[in-house]
Amino acid sequence: MRIVTAAAKAAVRENAPGLWAEKHWGLPWYVGKDLVLRMDPFTHHVGVEFWRGSTVADPDHLLEGTGTNLRHAKIHTAAAARSPEFARLLRAAVELDRVEPKRPR
């Protein structure tokens, strides 16, 4: 999963250059005005969790989950991490962070 994780991080750098890494609850998050996303490598995929996942635009239906705020995408390959669909999702999450007020934690 190292190659997939590296490709997903590269996609974040390319599509969300204004984000930086910060620890919250002992976990690394990519942050803009508020929390935006975090990544966890698993055995068969990289999980990308979106803080505002329930309201971020997801026309390609990459997000899963039913939480109040959080949703996640499962990235199985480096090609999926480099896909236009994942790039759109990243850009949408950054745009939502830019225009919406911070959410309570």
Image (cartoon, helix red, strand yellow):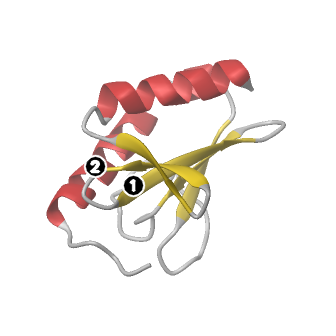
Residue 46 in view (yes/no): yes
Amino acid type at circle 2 is Val
Q: Is residue 51 left or right of residue 94?
A: right
Residue 31: x %, y % from top left: 36, 51
Which residue does the image show at 33% across and 52% down from the upper left? 93
| Quadrant location, the C terminus | bottom left
Crowding around mark 2 (Cα neighbors within 10 Å: few <14, some 14 to 19, many 20+) is many
Q: Is residue 57 or residue 50 the one in the foreground?
A: 50
Q: Is residue 90 or residue 105 the one in the foreground?
A: 105
Q: Is residue 45 above or below residue 3?
A: below
Q: Which residue is labeled 1 in the image?
A: 36
Amino acid type at circle 1 is Val
Q: Quadrant of residue 55?
A: bottom left
Q: CA distance from mark 2 to mark 1?
A: 7 Å
Residue 84 in view (yes/no): no
Q: Residue furthest right?
A: 43
The secondary element bearing badge 1 is classed as strand
Q: Is residue 75 or residue 24 the one in the foreground?
A: 24
| Quadrant location, the N terminus | top right
The secondary element bearing badge 2 is classed as helix
Q: Which residue is labeled 2 in the image?
A: 94
Q: Is residue 103 left or right of residue 2?
A: left
Q: Tell me which label, 2 or 1, sits earlier in the chain.
A: 1
Q: Is residue 58 left or right of residue 26?
A: left
Q: Kindly check if marks 2 and 1 are in contact, taking CB atoms under 8 A apart as contact.
A: yes
Residue 64: x %, y % from top left: 60, 61
Residue 14: x %, y % from top left: 33, 25
Which residue does the image show at 38% across and 45% down from the upper left? 89
Q: Is residue 86 above or below residue 1?
A: below
Which residue does the image show at 62% across and 28% down from the upper left? 5
Residue 15: x %, y % from top left: 31, 31
